[in-house]
């Protein structure tokens, strides 16, 4: 029977070699090889034994594959009589997941089919038809190379006995493991006849003059103007008093806020680094609040449009190592910019 095993291996190998040549053709074939364990029905009075196992799978889809599997080795009856056992099985396998993908993937499967078990002792030889069922796991270590654990029950239709074949082995898949690249579609070059940045197929205002700002439909936008103002008020050392020299600047900011009456303003207060940090934080807040109070009390700006924010000594604009730098850092600032349609 050893000759039969090697003949079976040779047949499987020959089938594989014809099926996978050339390999670049991505034939959906898997070669399996491993070591198994026959666990025999107690009524057979055979000792369980290890066995080599080889097989082939042909994938019809990502989920369905046809399989042929062969296992053969020698064992003994309980009385010591030596015998050979071989099993051919063919059938179908149902996988979860897909053949397409990267490595380190586990694909469980179910299997079922028909076959034969051949028990060949010195004095007799029996060949029984079997139905097999079981399942296992296929661990794809790479997109093609993997390991497999499998458990099958081999039910003899002739003797109504249930044997088991448990296997562990390696496999290699020759089929497609990556999605086909998306076809490259060469689109016709878009046409923008008037050069306004909107292609003709979307341009609802063709013939726009060069340089005209347009919306998404190619129609002219209203002309937008930008207005801005910047306030800077410097303070004496440790002081929150707003000097008279800055009153006109504050009046200009108030006029700007009245013109654009939906603006919200952050009035930022700052200090130099002389003194404790916590004190400087509070001092910067008071300085910002002093400018806010002038805008509210003298110019009628709503308080809910203004927010005094003290930054302490955290944002210097000059060096705190010089008197000029420290003087520049003792300040309140507000910067506004607004777009409006003319």
Image: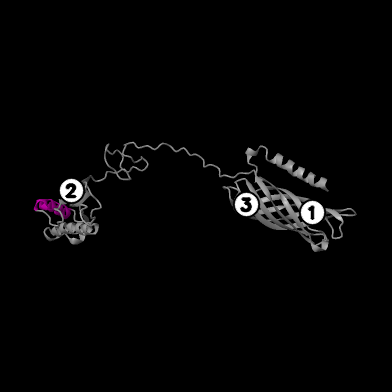
Look at the image and say whether residue 92 sits in the magenta stretch: no
- The coloring applied to the image is one colour
**Helix, strand, or loop for circle 1?**
strand
**Helix, strand, or loop for circle 3?**
strand
Question: Where is residue 90 drawn, in percent x and y?
Answer: 74, 51
Q: Nearer the viewer, mark 3 or mark 2?
A: 2
Question: Where is residue 222 drawn, in percent x and y?
Answer: 24, 46
As drawn, the residue found furthest toward the left would be 244
Write down the residue under mark 2.
328
Query: Which one is earlier in the sequence, the residue at label 1 or at label 2?
Result: 1
- Side of 90 relative to 284 (left or right): right
Write down the residue under mark 1.
116
Q: Nearer the viewer, mark 1 or mark 2?
A: 2
As drawn, the residue found furthest toward the right would be 123
**Helix, strand, or loop for circle 2?**
helix
Between 12 and 278, the one lying in front of the other is: 278
Query: Which one is earlier in the sequence, the residue at label 3 or at label 2?
Result: 3
Q: CA distance from mark 1 to mark 2?
A: 98 Å
* Residue at 27% across, 38% down: 211
- Side of 67 relative to 299 (left or right): right
Is the stretch drawn in magenta largely helix, strand or loop?
helix
Between 292 and 221, the one lying in front of the other is: 292
Check disc 3: other Cα within 10 Å, few if <14, some if 14-19, many if 20+. Answer: many
Question: Where is residue 298 drawn, in percent x and y?
Answer: 11, 59
What's the magenta region? 244-259
Query: Which one is earlier in the sequence, the residue at label 1 or at label 3?
Result: 1
Instruction: Decide if residue 181 is in sight here.
Output: yes
Q: CA distance from mark 1 to mark 3?
A: 28 Å
Write down the residue under mark 3.
139
Question: Where is residue 296 drawn, in percent x and y?
Answer: 15, 60
Do callouts 3 and 2 mark residues in contact (Cβ within 8 Å)?
Answer: no
């Amino acid at each position: 029977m050893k000759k039969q095993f090697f003949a079976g291996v040779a047949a499987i190998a020959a089938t594989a070699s014809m099926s996978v040549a050339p390999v670049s053709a991505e034939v959906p074939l898997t070669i399996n090889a491993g070591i198994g364990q026959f666990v025999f029905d107690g009524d057979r009075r055979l000792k369980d034994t290890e066995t080599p196992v080889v097989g082939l799978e042909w994938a019809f889809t990502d989920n369905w594959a046809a399989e042929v599997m062969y296992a053969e080795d020698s064992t003994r009856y309980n009385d010591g009589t030596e015998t050979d056992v071989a099993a051919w099985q063919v059938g179908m396998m149902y996988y979860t997941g897909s053949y397409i993908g990267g490595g380190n993937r586990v694909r469980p499967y179910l299997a079922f089919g028909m076959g034969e078990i051949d028990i060949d002792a010195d004095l007799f030889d029996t060949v029984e038809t079997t139905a097999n069922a079981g399942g296992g796991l296929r661990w794809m270590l790479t997109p093609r190379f993997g390991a497999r654990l499998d458990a099958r029950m081999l039910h003899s239709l002739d003797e109504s006995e249930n044997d088991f074949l448990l296997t562990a082995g390696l496999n290699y898949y020759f089929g497609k493991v990556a999605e086909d690249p998306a076809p490259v579609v060469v689109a016709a070059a878009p046409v923008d006849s008037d050069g306004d940045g909107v292609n003709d197929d979307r341009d609802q205002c063709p013939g726009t003059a060069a340089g005209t700002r347009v919306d998404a439909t190619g129609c002219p936008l209203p002309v937008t103007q930008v207005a801005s103002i910047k306030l800077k008020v410097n303070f004496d050392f440790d002081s929150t008093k707003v000097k008279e020299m800055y009153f006109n600047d504050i009046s200009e900011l108030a006029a700007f806020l009245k013109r654009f009456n939906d603006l919200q303003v952050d009035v930022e207060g700052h200090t130099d680094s002389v003194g404790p940090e916590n004190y400087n934080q509070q001092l910067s807040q008071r300085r910002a609040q002093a400018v806010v109070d002038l805008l509210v009390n003298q110019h009628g700006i709503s308080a809910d449009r203004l927010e005094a924010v003290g930054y302490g000594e955290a944002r210097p604009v000059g060096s705190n190592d010089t008197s000029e730098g420290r003087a520049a850092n003792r300040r309140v600032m507000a910067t506004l910019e607004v777009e409006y349609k003319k």
